[in-house]
Amino acid sequence: MNTKIEESESKYIVTLEGELDTAAAVEVEEQLKDLYNSNGKDVIIDCDKLEYIASSGLRILFRILKGAKACGSKVIMRNMNEDIKNVFKMTGFINIFEFE
Amino acid sequence: MAKPDKNSSTHSLHQKTDFWHLGVKNNVILNIVLAAILLEAISATQFYFTRNLLADELERRAETELVMKAIIVKNTLKISENSLWGHLWDMERNMEEPDSLYDVMEWVLRSHHNITGCGVAFLPGYFPQKGRLFEPYAFWDNGKIRKEQVASDKHDYTQKTFYKRVMAEDTSIWIDPYYDNITDRIIVTYAMPIHDNKNNVVAVFGIDVSTDILKDTLNYRHLYPSSYNILLTQSGELISAPDSKRVKYSNVEHVVNIINDSTSTKTMSKNGRCKIATFYDPDDNEKGYVYYATFKEKPDWQIAVVCYDKEVFGKLRKMHLILLLSMLAGIIVLGFIVSHFVKNSLKLKEANKAKERIDHELSIAKNIQMEMLPKTYPPYPERSDIDIYGSLVPAREVGGDLFDYFLRDEKLFFCIGDVSGKGVPAALLMAVIHTLFRSASAHENNPARILQSINETSCQGNESHMFVTLFLGVLDLPTGHLRYCNAGHDAPIIMGPTVTPLPVKANLPIGLFDDFNYEMQQTVLMPNSTMFLYTDGLTEAKNSQRKQFGLQRVQELLTRCTQEKKMPREIIETTIQEVHAFVMGAEPSDDLTLLAIHYMPQHFESILSETLTLKNDVRETAKLSSFMKSITEKLELDKSLARQLRLAVEEAVVNVIDYAYPVGIEGDVTIKVMSDNRCLKVIIVDSGVAFDPTAKEKTDITLSAEERQIGGLGILLVRELMDTINYERTDGQNILTLMKLLSNKKQ
């Protein structure tokens, strides 16, 4: 599981690569927890190379979303594959995240 | 929109009813008034005709009275006349000796007490020695007879009517009454001529008769107590009237005036014998009738009889009044009876309407109640492991029995119950219990705890102290593990290798004590066995001889059904048929409720079985990835399905790791994956504390980001990804079984 964060003036671009399962989530959370407070910047999460996500991964995304919402910025999901979109549908996350 | 319409139509219906009600009432009153008028008219007509008859009768009686009285008067007069005639000869013989005439006169007076005076008036100068006028006269005076010559210049008889008329007419006549100043009384005089031998009239012989004697003669008998007779001259002068003590003189005078008044109305009697006049007494305005007629012979006097209306028609009027009043009273009583009857019939009509309405509402209630019960059979056509059939035949429109069942996470929750009492109250409680069963079972698998919860709620405010016997079971379909709890209900019968009642503790019915501890019991249902549940409407069904169907018959019947391998529907239908045949049309006294559950678990022919044991640490889940990948590859599942299965198992396992073991306690989680090539079965077993993930309330995924909580995602995904999820706690282990049909399998 690889996680990459690019920061520009107005936004963060997060690239998730591989399988974000329960075991990987511990490490990913460590890397992304700075984004729990995005300081008003939008967060773009690129899922092009994300193959799998478990609920622990969803929880990290949810906390980023909560933080962004609190300071009026957006979280935008990008390039999500069908299986993961399905998971978003099952959990209702499709209603609370924005998609590109 | 329909509701207000409905209301307004109900309202107008009420108005119509009131109007109709009023109309009938008015009709009754109108009819009674018409009947009263008719009866009164009949009575008035009757009165009219009776009165006319009575008037005619009175006329006849008055005529008879007048004739009779006239005869009596005439006879009285005749006696006096005869006395005169009798002494005429004496008179004529003694004509030459005028003084001897006194003796004859005295004799006349003495022999006829009616005669008050007797005298002879001679032609002037007939006895030269006696002067020009000579009238010897004898009369009673205070009991003595006085005899004297009464003629004088002052008393010149030649000017008197009796003398002039007799001299002129040469015949005997009655002279109209006049006041006699000699005797000081009203008298009538009968006078006749006396002839000399040359047949010349030389004197007038007369007798005086007091009208007093006529008074007695006239009034010795009366038509009515207060009626009286009077005698008048032809010219209308009063000759005789009753004593003033009996009749006031003013009244008599008034009657005389009426008779003499040519302008007053008079009618002839039907026979033409008398005239009739109506009058009113001057003092008291009393109505009276006077009937009068003139004598046919001389003297041509008039005789009258007076009757008073109150005596003639008084009784008739009184009778009529009594009749009228009694008829009126009769009509009023009749009216009351009729109106009471009408009121009652209206009440009856209203009661019938109310009953119809209640019947209608009851039939709706029955429909609602029946709607609550499961009614689609077979209930789970996609499943081959259970078959269920239930039936409720209420004794009345609505019943107090209930049964229900539903599937949750591979567990069949079912119950059967009987509310104490029948009818609407029982049905209402039944509905409550039904709802409580559903809500209490939503997140609880333990039947005792479910019953406890139902009981606690039922006890709250149970002022009517109704109770419910209830049997509640939870059948774990993968294992056949049956957990059950009884609340005073009849034990279900297990139709397996043997037909025997399930051993049940009675406990207490629901609704009595809110702190009662219900005890759970359990058993394992053998494959291909049927559970038969019933209410006492079955065993206590009575025939016309009051004999009960009984448990014995039930067991025999079920044994037959078992031998014939009957399925739930056939079992229930056979039972109902047999009960009907037994009671033979006797009115059912209780609801008849039956529920049969056939259990036939599927044999799982495993072609693959792999096991992985993990420590209760999330980092261990990394091993799951390769474990699941190797299985899905072996089963040649497509990538997407493989990911789904992996995710489901991972979430289930993480859930167990998170919750089954308290912090710091180490333990194992065993994951066993099996497949029969048709479906995949995952069994996750741990030895931690009892934890039922299926009992968790489902996360609401429609909430916004702000409203949503982070928890519950794992179990939500498991439910979404797998076809079934089932939790069992057996031998101190949590066993979570997940199943997925492999329809997405690569071909």
Image (cartoon, coloured by chain):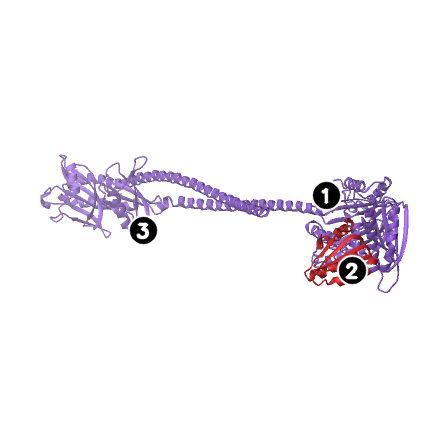
Q: Amino acid at mark 2?
A: Phe
Q: Earlier in the sequence, mark 3 or mark 2?
A: 3
Q: Quadrant of residue B617?
A: bottom right
Tell me which chain appears red.
A
For the residue labelled by badge 1, is the local secondary structure a helix, a strand or a loop?
A: loop
Which numbered tag is attached to residue B284?
3
Nearer the observer, B375 or B206: B375
State the SS at label 3: loop
* Label 1 with label 3: CB-CB less than 8 Å: no
Describe residue B205's horizontal placement relative to residue B362 as left or right. Answer: left
For disc 1, the marked residue is B587
The answer to whether residue B153 is left or right of residue B261 is: left
Q: How far, Cα to Cα, is label 1 from label 2?
A: 37 Å
Q: Position of residue B348 (x, y in %)?
A: 59, 45
For mark 2, what is the residue?
A: B516
Quadrant location, the C terminus of chain B: top right
Q: Is residue B42 left or right of residue B59?
A: right
Subunit bearing disc 3: B
Dots 1 and 2 on the same chain:
yes
| Residue B721 on image: x %, y % | 79, 50
